[in-house]
Image (cartoon, helix red, strand yellow):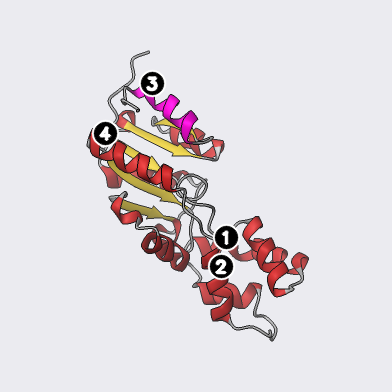
Amino acid sequence: MKKEKIKTLFLDIGGVLLTNGWDHLARNRAIAYFKLDGDEMNERHHLTFDTFEEGKLTLNEYLERVVFYEKRKFSEEEFIQFMFQQSVAYEDTIDFFKKLKKEHRLRVIAISNEGRELNAYRIKKFKLNELFDAFVSSSYVHYRKPDVDIFRMASDISQTSPKHSLYIDDRPMFVEIAKSLGMHGIHYKGLDETKTQLKKFKFAIE
């Protein structure tokens, strides 16, 4: 089957370009470091995290519900700094997509689930605005994956036909949703495998 020319690349951030911002591994490190009740924190997290990622709670409000519902021996500022420090870049992957964008004159747009403050920190810290032309982040648009509306919104913002769009994410369900809208999709399993998959779209990969 003939592959359409890709004009816009939609990328997830956590799990592709960076480590996840605040996943169970990061929370477990926080639980150990700050000596928290893990069961209680995780239950409170799961009850409120979607609301935070949709931009309906600030980071301080989220933490008041999840950590600082009782007096602690550490400050909110210390905890937030710890949260931010959990983010690590996959520099080779970021550099690769920057090169791909330049060589093939692609628009590159993020579709990500991220709370506003953490998202802003990660964009600035890792200079993601050097790669992305726009950020369709859950905390900005008040939809979060797997809601199909965040994908529709990203497609509308890009002004690109789905058949000329490619979405890459480390979560297969989200790739399936993008495909249901007519986009092409790649389940991200690492940079080398993604390079192989990209060759199907006539991208010259060194």
Chain-order first, disc 4 or disc 3 = 4
Category of crowding for the residue at label 2, using alpha-carbon neighbours closer than 10 angstroms: few (below 14), some (14–19), many (at least 20):
some
Q: Secondary structure at mark 2?
A: helix
Q: Is residue 192 magenta?
A: yes
Q: Identify which amino acid the numbered label 4 is placed on.
A: Lys
Chain-order first, disc 2 or disc 3 = 2
Q: CA distance from mark 1 to mark 4?
A: 31 Å
Q: Secondary structure at mark 4?
A: loop
Residue 47 is situated, as x and y percent measured from the top left of the image, at: 66, 63
Category of crowding for the residue at label 4, using alpha-carbon neighbours closer than 10 angstroms: few (below 14), some (14–19), many (at least 20):
some
Residue 8 is situated, as x and y percent measured from the top left of the image, at: 30, 37
Quadrant where the N terminus lies?
top left
Q: Label for residue 83?
A: 2
Label pair 1/2, CB-CB below 8 angstroms: yes
Q: Which residue is mark 4?
A: 7
Chain-order first, disc 2 or disc 4 = 4
Give the magenta range: 191-201
Q: Secondary structure at mark 3?
A: helix
Chain-order first, disc 1 or disc 2 = 1
